[in-house]
Image: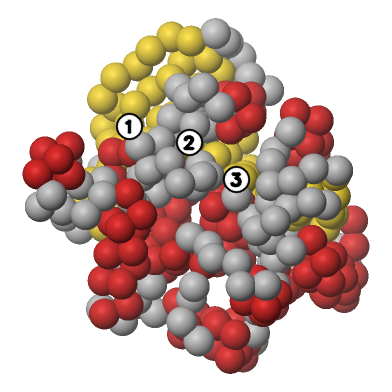
C-alpha cells in the first residue's frame, strides 16, 4: 500500500463492521423489458436497508452487474427511485437504461435519502431533523465517532457489491459502478476503495477539492473528508484507481465542480494510467453543458461499461 493511499484511508476514519447481507426479496414487479425487485439486506449489524435490483428479461447465463448510485439534487425523498426508473427525472433513470442493455443493476439508497430518513411521523412531529438538517446531523455524528459520512457511504456500497457478487445471475468478475453528481462522487471513491470494481463511470462528480474551496462552493457533506487536503486531493484518489477502466464525464459550464480543475485532475490521472501501462483505460468526456447527464453522454457512458464488462 502506498503512503498516500494509507493516509487517505486514515482520513476516512473507521468503517462499520461488514455483515453477511442476508438478502431477502420483498417484492417483484414486471416492467418494460425487465423485472424490478425490491431487496432488503444488512449494511452493518443492526442496520437493514432496501435497494432495487433490476433484472433484464430473457437471456441465459451470467451477466455483468452494475451499481447505479443516485444523485443528490437536494431531493432527500428520492434516492434509489431515480436510477430505478420510478422518478420523473428521466436523465437520472440510468439504472433502467443500463438494465435494458443487458446488465443486472442494483440501485441502493444512500444514507439520508428515501427509505433511509427518519420516519414520516418523526419528521412531522419535529422529533428528528429532516432534509439537509438530517444529512448534517448524520455527518456530524460520524465525525464525533471517529468516522465520516464518506466512510459510511463507502461501507454501504461495498455491501451492495457483495449483494451483486453473490447473485447467481451475475458474473462476479464483471462488476461496475456508475453514478451522477453525488452518485459520481461515490463511483469515484468506490472504484478507488474496492478492487472488485472492473469498470467505473463518474458523471459530474469529481474535481480538485482545493479548487472547490477556492471558489467557495458548498457541497454535500460526504465530500468533506477530514484532513484530506493535508495529504492529497481527488486527483490522488483517481490516480490510484489505475489500471481499472475509468470514464469521467463533465460539463464545460458545471458550476459546482470547476471544469478547469477537472481538466488538471484528468492530466494527473492520465499520467498515472500511462505509468501503469494502461493509457486507454482512462478517458474524459467534456461536453457543452452544466451539471447534468444528458442522453448522448449517458449513451457513451453505457458504451464504456459494455466495452470493459462484456466478455
**Residue ID at (42%, 59%):** 153
**Residue ID at (85%, 44%):** 287
Looking at the image, residue 239 sits to the left or right of residue 155; the answer is right
| Secondary structure beneath label 2 | strand
Q: Is residue 127 visible?
A: yes
Q: Quadrant of residue 269?
A: bottom right
For the residue pair 206 and 292, the one nearer the viewer reads as 292
Q: Residue 106: which numbered mark, if any?
A: 2
Looking at the image, residue 81 sits to the left or right of residue 2; the answer is left
User: Which residue, given by chain and number where applicable, does mark 3 sit on?
Assistant: 179
**Residue ID at (36%, 54%):** 132
For the residue pair 256 and 82, the one nearer the viewer reads as 256
For the residue pair 5 and 20, the one nearer the viewer reads as 5
| First in residue order: circle 3 vs circle 1 | 1
User: Which residue, given by chain and number where applicable, does mark 1 sit on?
Assistant: 39
- The quarter of the picture where the C terminus appears is top right
Q: Is residue 196 visible?
A: no
Q: Residue 24: which numbered mark, if any?
A: none
Above or below — where is 98 with respect to 198? Answer: above
Local crowd size for mark 3, using a 10 Å CA cut-off: few (<14), some (14–19), many (≥20): many
Cα–Cα gap, marks 1 and 2:
9 Å
Local crowd size for mark 1, using a 10 Å CA cut-off: few (<14), some (14–19), many (≥20): many
Residue 236, percent from left and from top: 69, 77
Asked if the residue at tag 2 contacts the one at tag 1, i.e. Cβ–Cβ closer than 8 Å, the answer is yes
Local crowd size for mark 2, using a 10 Å CA cut-off: few (<14), some (14–19), many (≥20): many
Cα–Cα gap, marks 3 and 1:
20 Å
Amino acid at each position: 500500500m502506498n503512503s498516500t493511499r494509507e493516509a487517505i484511508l486514515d482520513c476516512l476514519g473507521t468503517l462499520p463492521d461488514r455483515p453477511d447481507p442476508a438478502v431477502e426479496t420483498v417484492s417483484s414487479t414486471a416492467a418494460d423489458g425487465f423485472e424490478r425487485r425490491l431487496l432488503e439486506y444488512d449494511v452493518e449489524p443492526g442496520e437493514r436497508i432496501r435497494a432495487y435490483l433490476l433484472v433484464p428479461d430473457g437471456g441465459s447465463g451470467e451477466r455483468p452487474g452494475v451499481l447505479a448510485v443516485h444523485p443528490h439534487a437536494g431531493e432527500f425523498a428520492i434516492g434509489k427511485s431515480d436510477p430505478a426508473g420510478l422518478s420523473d427525472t428521466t436523465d437520472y433513470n440510468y439504472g433502467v437504461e443500463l438494465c435494458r442493455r443487458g446488465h443486472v443493476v442494483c440501485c441502493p439508497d444512500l444514507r439520508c435519502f428515501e427509505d433511509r430518513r427518519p420516519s414520516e411521523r418523526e419528521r412531522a412531529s419535529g422529533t428528528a431533523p429532516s432534509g439537509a438538517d438530517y444529512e448534517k446531523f448524520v455527518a456530524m455524528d460520524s465525525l464525533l465517532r471517529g468516522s465520516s459520512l464518506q466512510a459510511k457511504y463507502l461501507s454501504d456500497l461495498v455491501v451492495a457489491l457483495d449483494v451483486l457478487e453473490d447473485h447467481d445471475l451475475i458474473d462476479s468478475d464483471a462488476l461496475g459502478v456508475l453514478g451522477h453528481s453525488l452518485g459520481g462522487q461515490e463511483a469515484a471513491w468506490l472504484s478507488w476503495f474496492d478492487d472488485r470494481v472492473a469498470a467505473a463511470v463518474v458523471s459530474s462528480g469529481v474535481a480538485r477539492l482545493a479548487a472547490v474551496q477556492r471558489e467557495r462552493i458548498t457541497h454535500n457533506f460526504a465530500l468533506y473528508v477530514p484532513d484530506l487536503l493535508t495529504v492529497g486531493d481527488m486527483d490522488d484518489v483517481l490516480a490510484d484507481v489505475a489500471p481499472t477502466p475509468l470514464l469521467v464525464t463533465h460539463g464545460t459550464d458545471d458550476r459546482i465542480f470547476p471544469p478547469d480543475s477537472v481538466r488538471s485532475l484528468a492530466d494527473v490521472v492520465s499520467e498515472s494510467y500511462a505509468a501503469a501501462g494502461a493509457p486507454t483505460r482512462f478517458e474524459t468526456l467534456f461536453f457543452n453543458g452544466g451539471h447534468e447527464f444528458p442522453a448522448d453522454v449517458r449513451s457513451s457512458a453505457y458504451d464504456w461499461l459494455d466495452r470493459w464488462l462484456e466478455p
